[in-house]
Amino acid sequence: MPRFEPFPALRYSPDESLDLVAAPPYDVLSDRDIKDLLRLDAHNIVAIDVPRDSDGDGRYEAAAKRMNEWISSGVLVADPSPSFTLYRMQFTDETGAERETVGVIGALEVVDEGAGGVLPHEKTTPKAKTDRLDLTRATEANLSPVWGLSLAAGLTSLLAAEGEPVGRCIDENGVTHIVERVSDPSRVAAISAAVGAQPVVIADGHHRYAISRTYRDEQRAATGRNDLGSELTLTYVGELLEEQLSVAAIHRLISGVPDWALLQSFSPLFEMTSAGVVGPGHAREVVELGAMCLVHSDGHGTFMKPRPECFEGVRDLDSARLEHALTRVPSYELSYQHGVNNIVSALAAGDASAGVLLRPVSVAEIRRTADEGLLMPPKSTFFTPKLRTGLVIRPLNV
């Protein structure tokens, strides 16, 4: 089972407003988003996490220099001792219900692929960029956490609020993010033991975890040591429980084949009914109907309810059903998008010939995937709300 350890975190000074300096994860930000965040505050974490100073490797060195300057000037302050960080998110979900989730940020062991203890939960799409690796090399820090799901029963009860928060901010979606430092030795030991008692499933951040493995191997080769900070990586861990997760669907955009041809190819596998003009309410309707929805280029839709006999042996996932249905299509290109409005907008702009709305994956299916050591198709789950970057930074050289 994996080690999960506290560490002396870098945090923004209390003089800095987390509302202005924290940011969404790097992989959901556009160039415009980055510019807007830097206009809010020159100390926004994107100045380090997504540097845009220059082209080439120079931007990573600039990010490292900036981080060191912020430490020297007191913008970033190191904790006096190792700790865990409790991380709560308070939000309103898609059904209108008020929710609160809690997890713990610590340093999770980096294990070899297939070694067990830390498990992927879905197949990943190739990423050729070395951006995260180059940034890690330059800054010698983990800037944004991997998101892990623990199979340890009772972890949530160990994460009850007991002290004063060390940070709080509200993001652009109205989600309140609250962090609390845990340094009491007995409580630290209990949390570490709970997380280390069961496998941790990677929910989000497969690429970041893979980069951590590459960086660890580089450090081992360079130093001959296996006791450095690179042996672990910054990770948020929450218990795999229904009430602790908010899972949205990642929908599909299809190019290279007209919508009418898709409808023709899919019709033997599904019961087809008209869905009218597609809008945000269709995210709820596909769940209620037990169907997917093919979105046509004109913005209208067709509900597709799977015929059970056509999907024998196929995983109980819309992503797997669509993957199976697309074997009937000779040639196509697939891309991924969350949010019904984003699908409709992409079709209106001519970015694809059709879209497919999927239902969210159930927590029960996520647990079954973990228990049986299976993998879902790529981009099957979209965990919300997104963790903020900048609330906790993990130096690797302490």
Image (spheres, grey):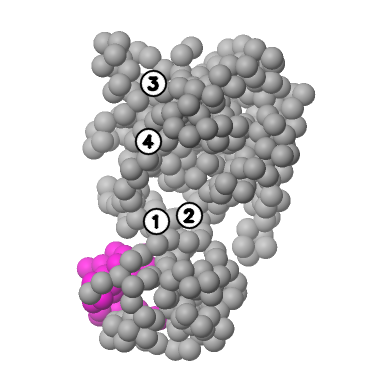
Q: Is 130 displayed left or right of 112 in the figure?
A: right
The structure residue drawn at horizontal position 35% and vertical position 13%, both measured from the top left corner, is 227
Which element carries disc 3, helix, strand or loop? helix
**Which one is earlier in the sequence, the residue at label 4 or at label 2?**
4
Q: Nearer the viewer, residue 245 or 53?
A: 53
Neighbor class of circle 1 (other Cα within 10 Å; few <14, some 14-19, many 20+) is: many
**Quick check: 241 above or below 349?**
above
**Which one is earlier in the sequence, the residue at label 4 or at label 3?**
4
Residue type at numbered disc 4:
Thr
Which element carries disc 2, helix, strand or loop? strand
Which residue carries the number 3 mark? Answer: 230
The structure residue drawn at horizontal position 64% and vertical position 19%, both measured from the top left corner, is 70
Using the numbered discs, state the Cα–Cα distance from disc 4 to disc 3 in whole angstroms.
Answer: 17 Å
Which residue carries the number 1 mark? Answer: 379
**Quarter of the view holding residue 53:** top right
Closer to the eye: label 4 or 2: 4
Mark 1 and mark 4 in contact (Cβ < 8 Å)? Answer: no
The structure residue drawn at horizontal position 30% and vertical position 21%, both measured from the top left corner, is 218
**Which one is earlier in the sequence, the residue at label 1 or at label 3?**
3
Mark 2 and mark 4 in contact (Cβ < 8 Å)? Answer: no
Q: Is residue 101 visible?
A: no
Q: State which region is magenta.
A: 304-329
Which element carries disc 4, helix, strand or loop? loop
Neighbor class of circle 4 (other Cα within 10 Å; few <14, some 14-19, many 20+) is: few
Which residue carries the number 4 mark? Answer: 130
Which residue carries the number 2 mark? Answer: 382
Q: Is residue 308 magenta?
A: yes
Neighbor class of circle 3 (other Cα within 10 Å; few <14, some 14-19, many 20+) is: many
Q: Is residue 318 visible?
A: yes
